[in-house]
Image (cartoon, helix red, strand yellow):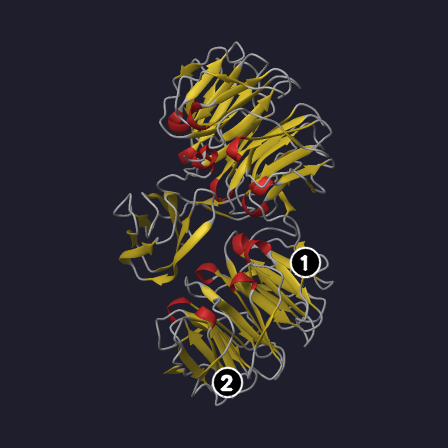
Amino acid sequence: MKHPLSSFLILPCAVLALTGMSLAQGGWFWQNPLPQGQSLHAVAYTDANTGTAVGWNGTILRTTDGGATWAIQASPARIQFIGVAFTDANTGTVVGERGAILHTTDGGVHWTTRTSGTTRWLQEITFSDSNTGTAIGDSGTILRTTNGGASWTAQASGTVDQITGVSLTDADTGIAVTLNGMILRTTNGGTNWSSAPSGAPYAVQSIAFTDALNGTAVGDKGSILRSTDGGTHWSMQSSGTQSNLRRVTFVDAHNGTIVGASGTILHSTDGGATWSLQASMTTDFLLGVSFSDAGTGTAVGLDGAILRTTDGGATWSRQSRGTMKNLIRVHFSDVNTGTIVGRNGTILRTTDGGATWTTQTSGTTKDLTGVCFTDADNGTAVGLSGTILRTSDGGTHWAPQTLGIPSWTYPSDVFFSDARTGTIVGSDGMILRSTDGGATWSVQTSGTVYSLAAVHFADANTGTVVGEGGVILRTTNGGTHWTIQNSGTLRNLVDVFFVDINTGTAVGENGSILRTVDGGATWTMQSSGTTMALSGVCFTDALNGAAVGWLGTILRTTDGGSNWMNQTGITDNILNAVYFTDANHGTAVGLSGTILRTTTGGTTWVEEERAQPTTLQLAQNYPNPFTTSTSIPFTLGKPDFVSLKIYDLLGKEVAVLLNESKTAGSHTATWNATGMPRGVYFAVLRTGAVTECRTMVIARESGR
């Protein structure tokens, strides 16, 4: 039995295309997690108080109080930043996607673009002094500056491998490492780079030298290598972990720190001769770390994770805050009062427009998939295994109700038109009706076996349901009779909203938006301008509406959908639902605890959209369906850095197949899905400019 909401929330289209944007100002801002929820890849502190962190979607964060507060700085572009280095509190450089280099001389108040001369992804940047710096990246890229980053010159590395780390001990002496474990060394400022193998058994991700002789390299499977002769010879060290290690740094000749997957943090006080595991109190993948002195350090990672220590890592505290549970539905009874439901029985409540969100006790660990309030006090939530919860005091207390349906049925949405009259929809065409505030529920005949995803009533009698295969059902007598309407599509429809008995909008996969102005007698497909799966829609009147979906898609209309404006840009997390209380005030929720808020209708983005050429083609995997393994072919129009990841129906990343540079031409990746449960999965292939997706099906439990 499949979970109906999972079938609808995040199903992407076969091909997903992204457009580049230059964002000057945003009408959407983060409410959870804080300070924001994009993955952070690097952090640099110049003293105990002053630091900068960078990451996905052009994220640049700045603190001047040791991370007690972080300010989001304006970025010139929505691209992926991977490395950051500051030579003093004001002067810094950021590197990232497609050769991007940004420079600031005022602590990030203003960032200016520098010409790198390359379109390769840059993975790290470091300076030996205020003038002399090196950036490294894909396909053997090495760039050099001797004027503080004002200009950059390419150097010959002698390799086409991805260079993952670099360390400078003075203006002339530097060591870099490739993903394949090749050690590159220069003693003349990079005029010449010599190479020698390190003997690393696994991929190498980072390197740090404390002087010209002593250095440490780290990589996958907990591998740590140590050299005491300038990188000529390397010996394996014990890490005590099998986690992939991503970054190593030394603050002095003795004190070093390594971070990696599953919240792994290792610390050394003897120059890297020995390493001990520290308790990070997190399972987040940590990607970057910086220490300003032996005691004071910060680590950053996926989903905006920020950790801080002031005692050399003996204790780490989390500076980023808020739930990381996937959030599925949101409903507001007025501009200030709202409720969000999600994974593992999560219920969040606000009475101040989202300035603060309070966790409520649901009494269940089942995923909650729908919520509706008729006023500030009276609300209902539904979820997996026939879960239904009811509150009459704004969620201070939630009481379970009995649906009288099998536990394997899955309610996906609920709507109450008043405190007593409500409807629930779900798997296998299920429709339930209550006229006594949920005390009892009666089964209605839907006339379909398709899973139903969403329900909305314009009044107590007039309602619409949408679901799998483009199904649309309509009632004008409170559900005594449901009539199938012609949607004109076979695509899954995920959400529906009516502003009156005649005017409604439904959204679904492949960017589908359907509109009716005659109560569903006819439905017209509108141009959404996206092929991203849409999972939530809300209108405040016949003209003003918003839709959200896959990879942070936010669409906005002020003319009833004749035109949809793309407000995407603040996140690439999947957004599952959106709710507006008026034309200006809205909230969107999604994966990894994402809560976004606008008080301006989201229209204060200054956007310059640029068409990006499609240089990426992802073919259908074969075999499909499959049982144990499958091949995923793709073609690149030109050399590029490629990410190929596998997601399940809830948007959880379950495998990373590729995260590396590839040459132009045809390639094939293999996914060994042994141990994965049967069901639908998505292969998502990304370059810097384009994203494509294919749906895959495991036909039975792999490995059985």
For label 2, the residue is 173
Label 1 Cα neighbours within 10 Å, binned few <14 / some 14-19 / many ≥20: many
Q: Position of residue 593 (x, y in %)?
A: 59, 46
For label 1, the residue is 319
Task: Give the mark nearest the N terminus, 1 or 2.
Answer: 2
- Number of numbered tags placed on the structure image: 2
What is the three-letter code of the residue carrying label 2?
Thr
Q: Rounded to the nearest whole Å, what is the CA distance between mark 1 and mark 2?
A: 36 Å
In front of the other: 681 or 497: 681
Kindly identify the residue that appears in the image at 35 percent across and 40 percent down: 14
Kindly identify the residue that appears in the image at 57 percent across and 83 percent down: 210
Q: Quadrant of residue 178?
A: bottom left
Q: Position of residue 121 (x, y in %)?
A: 44, 63
Q: Position of residue 138 (x, y in %)?
A: 40, 67
Q: Does residue 426 appear in this view?
A: yes
Kindly identify the residue that appears in the image at 45 percent across and 51 percent down: 653
Kindly identify the residue that appears in the image at 51 percent across and 30 percent down: 412
- Secondary structure of the residue carrying tag 2 is loop
Q: Position of residue 424 (x, y in %)?
A: 53, 24
Q: Quadrant of the N terminus?
A: top left
| Image: 504 above or below 65 | above
- For this orientation, the residue located farthest to the bottom is 229
Q: Quadrant of residue 171?
A: bottom right
231 on left or right of 278? left
